[in-house]
Image: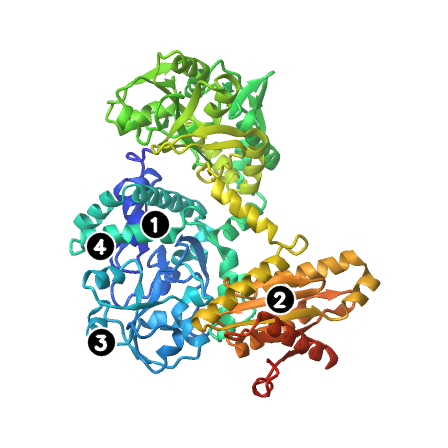
Amino acid sequence: MHLFADAPLTPLSIQLDWKYQFQHAGIIMAKERGYYKDVGLDITIKEYKKGINITEDILSGKSTFGLINTSLIYDNDGNLQPAVLLATYLQKSPLVFITQPTLTKPSMLRNKKIMITAYEAENSSLSLLLNHFSIPYTYLPHSYNINAFKNKKVDAISAFVSNELYDLKKEKIPYNIIDPADYGFVTNAMNLFTSDTFAKQHPKLVEKFLMATKQGWEYALEHPKKTAMIIHEKYRPSADIKKLTYEATVIKNLMLTDLFDIGETNKDLMRRIYKQLVRSGKLKPGQEAKILTFDDILNTINNQPIIFNKKEQQFLAKKGVIKVCGNPDIMPFEGIINGKHTGIIGDMITLIKDKTNMNIVLYPTKDWGACLNAIKEKKCDFAASITNTKQRRKYINFTDNYLHFPIVIATKNDKPFIEDIDKIKEKKLGVTKDLAIIEILKQRTNNTINLVEVENDMDGLKKVENGTLYGYINDLTVIAPKIQQHFAGSLRISGRLKENDDISIGVRNDEPILRDIFQKTLTHITPAEKQKIFNRWISVQQVVSTDKRLIVEILTASLLIFAGLFLYLMQLKKHNRELLHIARIDELTQIANRLKIDEILNQQQELIDRYGLQCSFAIFDVDDFKKVNDTYGHLAGDKILQDISHLISTSIRSTDTIGRWGGEEFMLICPNTAVNDIYNLVQEIQKDIKQTIICGERHITLSVGVRFLIQGRPIDIALKLTDDALYKAKNSGKNRAEMMDIQDILNGKET
C-alpha cells in the first residue's frame, strides 16, 4: 500500500467502450478504493457517448487509455495502427448474435435484417463470421435496446451475453444465440490500449495503472454486490441492481480466472486473429511486426543499454563508494551471512552492480531498525528492499515499486482459514518491529487492530506456536520457509491479506540524483532476470485451507513471483487435464498426435450425424521427404517437421486442429467449414511453406488431399477418398491440393 496523500498525482484518463456497467468494475473500484491514488495517479473515467472514436482519442492523446473489444486496431485501408495492447480483461468475448428462435445457424441469416453497430459490422468476431459464410444482410443501426427485437422488427441483433440476455429473460422473450466462437472465431474483449508513443515514453505510468486496475478487479470479483451498489449509486443510477449483479456473474465467467491472470494478454491469439483478418481482406499482409503488447515494449526498453546523463555521471564519480544496508535475518528474502549481502535482495544488488559498475558496499547493521536509523542519520546511502510509507518519506526518497510480495498470516493448524483480517483484528497478531505493515494495517483499520510487536520472525512464530499470539503477519517469502524448517506440523499459512508488500529502493533524501540513478537502472532489469533470482531462492511447500474445508496440498511447488507475486494453486483436476493433454501430443512437433486426431474426427462425425453440421479436413504430405533425410540427415528432417507444425498452427483458428497423422503426414481438421474454404486455406498454407521453409537449396513443399465428412457415412470412406486425392496431387507434379468434385460424389464413388 502506498500513501500518496502528500505527493502530487499524475493526471491520466481512460475512455470506456460503453455506459457504466459491471464490465468496467475493475476500473471503477480502483478509483473508488483509492488504488490509483495509492500509486500516484489521478484517473478520469470517461463514459462512452455516441460519436466518440476511441481509437482516434487514444492515438491523438485525447485519452491516455481506451477499452476496445478487439485485440487489433486497424484503419479502413487495412493498416494496423500504432497502438499497444496493455491488458485483456475478458478472455472470451461476450459478443454474440441474438436471433429470432427459428434462426439457429449462420446460413439462416442470409438476407435478414440485422441490427448491429457500425464498428461491430467491420471490426468484430461477428463481422468475421458473416464474411466467412458470405452472408448478405440488411444493415440496421443499433438502437442499444431490445425493443426492435422484441417487436420482431429485426431478425437478429448484436448483443453482450452479460447485458441484453438479462432483459430478454426478464421479459420472457424467446430467442436463439449464434456465437462466433462455436464456428471457430474465438476472440476476446475489453482490451485495454494506449498509443505506442505513450507506452514507450511512460512505461512506469502504464505499469502503475495496470497494477492498480488489477487490484480493482480483484476487489470487484470478491465483492460483486458492493461493487454493483457503488456503480448504481455513484455512476449509473438508472442501472438495475439485479441486472448489475447478474452481469457480475457472467463477467467473472468470461474472465476465465482459473486459466488466466487478470488482464493477461495472448499474443498467439492476436496472431491468429491477424491471419483471419488478412484472409478476409480486412487487413493487409506483412504487418506481423506491428502486433504489439506492452511486454514487447518492456522487452525493447530493458534490452537497451543504461545511459546516465552528465549530472548522474558526475555524481557517481564524486560519490565513489555507495553504502547499502538491509535486514540481516529474513532469508531467503534478505540476509547478511559472513559479511555478505545474500538472498533475493543480495542477488538484486549484484545485478544492479553488474549493470551499472557502481561501487556498492555493505554497511552492516544488527537489525532492520538499525538500518532505517542509518539511512536517517546519513550513514547509509540506501536500502534495496523497503516499503514506501508516509513516515519513511520524511527522510527517504523512493523509486517505483519493482517487487511485489503477498502478505500472509500464519496460525496454528487448528485455526480456520482467514478470509478477512478485519474479522480477527481484536486477537493478538504479531508483527516484527519497524516493519511497514504496522503502519499500513493501523491506517486501514483506523488503529483498531491488536498488533503486538516482536523482535523477529522466529520470535513471532514461536509465540504463535505456544499460544501467546493468535497469528503472525509478514511476507510469504519470509514466513513459508521458516514454517517448513522449524514449525512443520504445528503452524500453517491460514490466509492472505489484501495488501501486498510493494518493494522499492529507498535512498537518503539529501541525494535525489542517486534515487534517479536507481530508478533508471530498475527499468533495465527484465522479468526473466527477476524470475531467475526468484527460482534460485524460493521453494514453498504448504497446506492451504478454505472456508469450505477444501484442503489442497502443494508439494515442492515453485513460487512464481513477478508483478504481484501470486501463488498459483494447481488443483488435481487441472493436473489431470495436463496429463491427458500430454498423452495426446506428438513429442517432436508438440501438436496433436494420431490418438487425438482420431478422437476429434469421431467427435465431429457424431455432431454431423446428429445436427447436420459441416466439417472439412485435409491431409498434408511433405514432398520428397526421404530425399531431404538422405541428403541433410534426420535432424534436418525433424526440424522441417517442427517448422511446418508451427507455421500451420499459427495460420488456423483456435477451434481448428493440426496434428501429426504419421511420419511426414499431417492432418488439419476444420469444424463448421465448407470444403471450398479449407481448400483456399490449404493453398495459402502451401504458399507460406514454400516461401519460408528451406533446407539447403531446397524449398520445402506439400501435397494435400482435401475432404469433408458427410452425414451418415463412415469416416473410413472419407479418409480413403482423401488419401486418393493426396495420391493424385503427388502424381500431378506435387505441391498441389486435390479434392473430390461434386461429379465424383454424384457418380457414387462414396458408396
How packed mark 1 is, by other alpha carbons closer than 10 Å (few <14, some 14-19, many 20 or more), is: some
**Observer able to see residue 124:** no
**Which residue corresponds to mark 1?**
252
Nearer mark to the viewer, of 2 and 4: 2
Alpha carbon distance from label 4 to label 1: 14 Å
Nearer mark to the viewer, of 4 and 3: 3
Q: Earlier in the sequence, mark 2 or mark 1?
A: 1
**Which residue corresponds to mark 4?**
243
Indicate the amino acid at tag 4: Lys
How packed mark 3 is, by other alpha carbons closer than 10 Å (few <14, some 14-19, many 20 or more), is: few
The vertical placement of 274 against 440, above or below, is below
Does 121 sit left or right of 281 as displayed? left
Q: Are marks 2 and 4 in contact (CB under 8 Å)?
A: no
- Identify the residue shown where x is 69% and y is 69%: 621
Alpha carbon distance from label 3 to label 2: 44 Å
Q: Nearer the viewer, residue 300 or 311?
A: 300
Indicate the amino acid at tag 3: Lys
SS at mark 2?
Answer: strand
Alpha carbon distance from label 2 to label 1: 36 Å
Q: Nearer the viewer, residue 101 or 153?
A: 101
Q: Nearer the viewer, residue 725 or 589?
A: 725
**Which residue corresponds to mark 2?**
667
Alpha carbon distance from label 4 to label 3: 23 Å
